[in-house]
Every structure is written in structure tokens, then in C-alpha cells.
Image: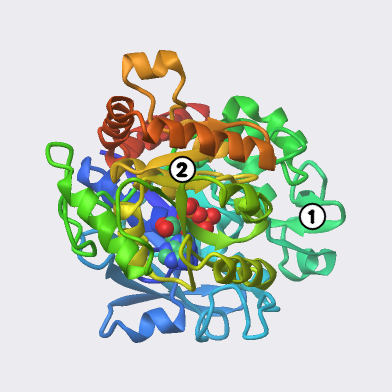
Amino acid sequence: MKKILFATSEAFPLIKTGGLADVSGSLPIALNALGHDVRILMPAYADLLAGLSNLPSKRINQTGGMVEIFETMLPGTTVPVWLVSHEGAFDRTGNPYLAENGKPWIDNAERFALLCRVGVEVAMNRIGFGWKPEIVHCNDWQTGLIPALLEDEVDRPATVYTIHNLAYQGLFPKELFQKLGLPQRFWSHNSLEFYDQLCFTKGGLVYADRINTVSPNYAVEIQGKEFGCGMEGLLKQRKDRLSGIINGIDEDAWNPATDPLIPNTFDLSDMTGKQKNKFALQKHFNLSVGNNVAVLAMVGRTVQQKGIDLVIEAMPKLMEMPLQLVILGSGEKKYEQTLKHWQTLYPDRIALKLGYDEALAHLIEAGSDLFLMPSRFEPCGLNQMYSQRYGTVPIVRCVGGLADTVEDTTPANLEIGTASGVVFHETSVEALLAATLWALDLFNKKPQWKKIQRAGMQKDFSWKQSARKYLDLYNLALQDRH
Ligand code: ADP
């Protein structure tokens, strides 16, 4: 049994702004189920604390004042959660990182440095919990200072730093380095300095015993200029300590055999429910109902990262193909408006819902034939995994986690039964259209189509599998600890 401190800035269902919350709300449970002692450390945001009452707590003195650490459990589980509370830091409502004007809270450096300092105290068993972890697992920049601050501690735990999104690095002006009272030796380009700024992420990238990201392919990609966000040199230097582990999916919430959010459940032994869901989806959007035409879907943020601009550019040619297009998403207004324009031009061919709609996302996964993800970059991606589980064949660009989770339909893969989608390489309209045509061709070849659906539906995207890989990573971190 390993003792693991999981430090994070968000965890589902307590608080969520993105994929990090899903990982933080799932991986500790999966590790716990494998018999390990995992405890989560995160901020006690006001909105979160408001939903909990009568929590036991411990108080400690920290630079900047008294810190109170509340003890609770991840809802519905036995995974302990320690919530760090400090007057003026986390006791405000709203987004954890952004003020109402959409800009980062002006004291983010102080707030998350405090979380990191408390993380060190917990890691070194100096709070009075009578518990010392062997591993501290840090996640993204908000916890990036922990591996750096632990560096000088005698008999410290091993550290793992996971990159969920390298684009967010916790960059702050030099003055904050002084203000936070960080050791002077950290002000170096070999340490926390990044072009004259303080960089929290570098605390993880430079000092963690092991670094990983959320897919093996993205771990390679970020060592290059295109995806490295300026960190490629450092990551290349530490490539022996860098690896990737695909995120799991919530297999209870996304299970076509039991999903309460879809009208007809189904599984591999009886796919009639899928057909009925397709008709329900077509009805929902007033599209003509039938199985001759393929439904091609997209769910996600309408931003350039996801290649929505390519889809818009490809629209005239897509509309010449025998397909119905279903899009659910929100994001940049200019793309939303252009999509609206296309929808009014082809009301019987294009279905569009702008906004966030969890239930509709389930119906779309369950009722579509094809799912399009032409992303420019994709650290892991979830929808391509949901799609395969629901017998919806993904068309993806060969990038990041998409490349790791979808097997292209080559003749060889089809033969051995591993083909589970259509993969294209170039970021171009031509490549997207060629892949779509190939997928439509497959849709009309029923024996092959069924084989592709079967391969996807049988894949293991469980957290259990990912948790085992994290355990291997923790062992490596323990070996590498100096
Ligand atoms: P990212 O984290 O980059 O946005 P992912 O594919 O990793 O992309 O995860 C996005 C998650 O959010 C998926 O579960 C997806 O289904 C969901 N999602 C995104 N946009 C919407 C929306 N408009 N309505 C419902 N679910 C959405």
C-alpha cells in the first residue's frame, strides 16, 4: 500500500472548471480501489465550503497568517480531502482562477504559493495529521512550487508532476518572486525564472522526480517547438523523466448499457437501441429521420484548438456529401455566428445547439454514426473515447491523445480487428474532407462498419488501467528520488 498526497486546484464534484477536475475526482478513487491510501489537498474555495458544514479542522501558522485545514471526503467515497483555508486567499466566490472581469485574480501567485507551502507541510508531516506520504503527486502550475520547495527537505517524499495543460504556466512579474520570499537560488533560468518572470510550472518541470502528461504522444509532442509552449528545451533535457498516461473515462456515467440520459440503452450484443437513438436525435433536431444518411457529430469548445475553423471552411464540400451534421458547442463568438449562418442555409442538414448541455452530449454520442475531432492539439481528449464506447466511429487528426486512443482503419488493422476510427494527418481542409469521405464509404460497407464499431466498444478506457500506470510511475519516482 502506498501513501499518496494528491495536490490539485480542483476536483469533481467539489469544484470543476476543466479536465483537471475530472482527473482529480477519478484517479484518487481508482488508486484507493487498488488498495492505496490517497489523500487530496486542495483550496477551500468559498463556494465549495458553503456546501459543507461542521468539518473538523487543524490550524497552523504560515507566512502570511493562520491557515485552517478542513477535513472532508470526496463525496460518495472514502477518499479524504484536506481543504486549505486562509483569510483573503480562497474565501471568495466565483471562478477559482478568474475574477468577474475574466482576468486572473491579481493575487493568484500569493494564493497558490500558499497552497504549495501548505502542501510541503502536509508532505513533511508537520501539521499533526500523523500521516506522511511516500509520494506527492502535483498537478499543473497551481501546485508547481511543491517539488521545488521540497527539494531541500531531509527525508522528503518522491514527487510527480502532471502536465494537464502546458499552455497555462503560472507566469508572474519578477517582483512577486521577492514578495513571496522564495529562496534566491530559485531565480535562475535553470530554476523558476522564465525570461525574467516567475514561472510556477517550472517548479514541477525542473524539480519533480518524474514528470508526466495526459497521453504518451503529447509527452513527445511537447518536446518540440510546435507544442512545447517555450518549455521544449527543458522538457527535452528531462526526457528520461517524462512520460504520458492516458486519462481514463468515467465508465459509469458513459456506459451505453446503463446511461440514464439516453432514450434507449444498448450494447454490443444488441445494437437496436443505437439505431433508435439515431432516430431520436434526428427528431430532436427536426432532421429527416432515417438510417440511409450518416449523422456526423461534434461536441466541444468552438475554438481554433479544436479545428472548428477547418470544419467551417470545409462546409460547402461537406454539404455535398450524404450526411447530416450535428454540432453542440460554445466558445468563440465569431465561430458560433458562422455556424449559425450555415445552419440557416441548410436547416434540414445541419443541427446546431450553442451552449453547454450534458444530456444532449450523451444523446449525440449515442445517436450519431460518426464523430469529428480535427484538433490542432489535444493533450488527451475525452470525446473520442466516449464515441468508441457508444459505437460512434471517430474521425480524428493524428495528434496528442487522439493518436493514442484511435486506431486508424488501414487494411491491416481492419483485418486483425483493431481498426476503431479514421485518422488523418495534415491540419487541412483537404485532409479533413478526404477522411470524411473514407468514413462515409466505410459506413456503407456494413460488415466492415460493424467490425470497426465492435473494436471501439470493446476497448478498455477505464481509470483502473490508468491508475495502474500511475502506480508504476510512482515507483519510478521513488527510485529516482535523490
Ligand atoms: P477540452 O477539455 O479540451 O475541452 P475534452 O474532449 O478533453 O476537451 O473534454 C471536454 C469535455 O466537455 C467532454 O466531456 C465534452 O463532451 C464536454 N463538452 C464540451 N463542450 C460541451 C458542450 N457544449 N455541451 C456538453 N458537453 C460538452
Query: For the point 77% across and 58% down, which residue is it?
Result: 198
Residue 444, position as x, y percentages in the image: 37, 33
> What residue is shown with label 2?
157
- 322 above or below 172? above
Crowd tier of the residue under label 2, counting other residues whose Cα lies within 10 Å: few below 14, some 14–19, many 20 or above: many
Residue 253, position as x, y percentages in the image: 25, 57
> What residue is shown with label 1?
184
Q: Tell me which amino acid carries mark 2.
A: Pro
> Is residue 220 shown left or right of residue 181?
left
Q: Earlier in the sequence, mark 1 or mark 2?
A: 2
Residue 333, position as x, y percentages in the image: 66, 73
Q: Tell me which amino acid carries mark 1.
A: Gln
Residue located farthest toward the right when viewing the structure as drawn: 196
| Alpha-carbon span between mark 1 and mark 2 | 23 Å
Query: Which image quarter: residue 361?
Result: bottom left
Answer whether residue 126 is visible to the viewer in this image: no
Q: Secondary structure at mark 2?
A: loop
- 321 above or below 103? above
- 287 above or below 413? below
Q: Nearer the viewer, residue 289 or 370?
A: 289
Q: Secondary structure at mark 1?
A: helix
Q: Nearer the viewer, residue 430 or 247?
A: 430
Q: Nearer the viewer, residue 245 or 376?
A: 376
Query: Which image quarter: residue 301?
Result: bottom right
Question: Is label 1 within 8 A of ligand 1 (CB to nearest ligand atom)?
Answer: no
